[in-house]
């Protein structure tokens, strides 16, 4: 059965992005590349058009569209982490080389792509029918840039 996958307009950085993400996400699988042929846009024939990578089971196609299309906050990738060590690892790696932290567990990598580095239990806490527990966890989260699993869990459990 065919599965939907994500295409990311990477301007001219597809190959560099694949290399960067493969170095961060262990077990990533680099897929096929395609290359520009003759084209009306003046892109050099033989340069990378698309590069595929699978990260944490999610297939991505990075497209060198050769027109600047900046990323924005409306799309992000969520990386669920079982331990604080995992959160720390992804946070450090994704902010390296020019990335930057953002509030509430978000980071912007050096290419401008947004990531949410979150506890694996975040969805459970956030969708709880216990409004007090959910709100206590959210109030704690709003105080943070990099998320702290122990503090979030303590806030959730205490309420």
Image (cartoon, rainbow, N blue to C red):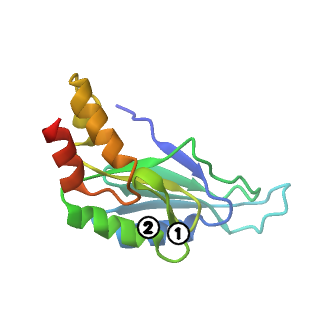
Judge left or right: residue 127 versus residue 100.
left
Residue 158's spot in the image, x, y percent? 14, 40
Label 1 with label 2: CB-CB less than 8 Å: yes
Q: Out of 150 and 70, give the one closest to the viewer.
A: 150
Sooner in the amino-acid sequence: mark 1 or mark 2: 2
Of the numbered discs in the image, which one, if any, rests on residue 127? none
Asked if residue 88 is positioned above or below residue 49 in the image, the reply reads below
Residue at 18% in and 55% down: 150
State the residue position of label 2: 94
Asked if residue 128 is positioned above or below residue 93 in the image, the reply reads above
Image quadrant where one finds the C terminus: top left
Judge left or right: residue 153 versus residue 10.
left
Asked if residue 92 is positioned above or below residue 14 in the image, the reply reads below
Judge left or right: residue 143 versus residue 148.
right
In the rendered image, is residue 123 in sight? no
Of the numbered discs in the image, which one, if any, rests on residue 99? 1
Report helix, strand or loop for mark 2. helix
Image quadrant where one finds the N terminus: top left
Residue 4's spot in the image, x, y percent? 44, 35
Q: Can you name the residue that lies furthest to the bottom here? A: 97
Q: Out of 139 and 86, give the one closest to the viewer.
A: 139
Residue at 39% in and 35% down: 3
Tell how many labels. 2
Q: Can you name the residue that lies furthest to the left here? A: 157
Residue 48's spot in the image, x, y percent? 63, 65
Residue at 74% in and 67% down: 45
């Amino acid at each position: 059965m065919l599965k939907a996958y994500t295409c990311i307009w990477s301007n001219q950085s597809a190959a560099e992005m694949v290399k960067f993400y493969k170095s961060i996400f262990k077990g990533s699988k680099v897929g096929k590349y395609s290359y520009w042929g003759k084209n009306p846009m003046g892109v050099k024939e033989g340069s990378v058009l698309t590069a595929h990578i699978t990260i944490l089971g999610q297939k991505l196609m990075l497209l060198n569209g050769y027109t600047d299309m900046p990323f924005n906050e409306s799309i992000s990738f969520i990386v669920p982490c079982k331990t604080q060590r995992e959160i720390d690892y992804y946070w450090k790696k994704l902010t390296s080389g020019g990335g930057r932290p953002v509030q509430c567990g978000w980071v912007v990598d050096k290419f401008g792509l947004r990531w949410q580095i979150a506890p694996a239990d975040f969805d459970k806490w956030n969708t709880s029918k216990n409004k007090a527990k959910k709100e206590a966890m959210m109030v704690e989260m709003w105080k943070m840039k990099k998320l702290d699993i122990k503090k979030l869990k303590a806030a959730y459990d205490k309420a």
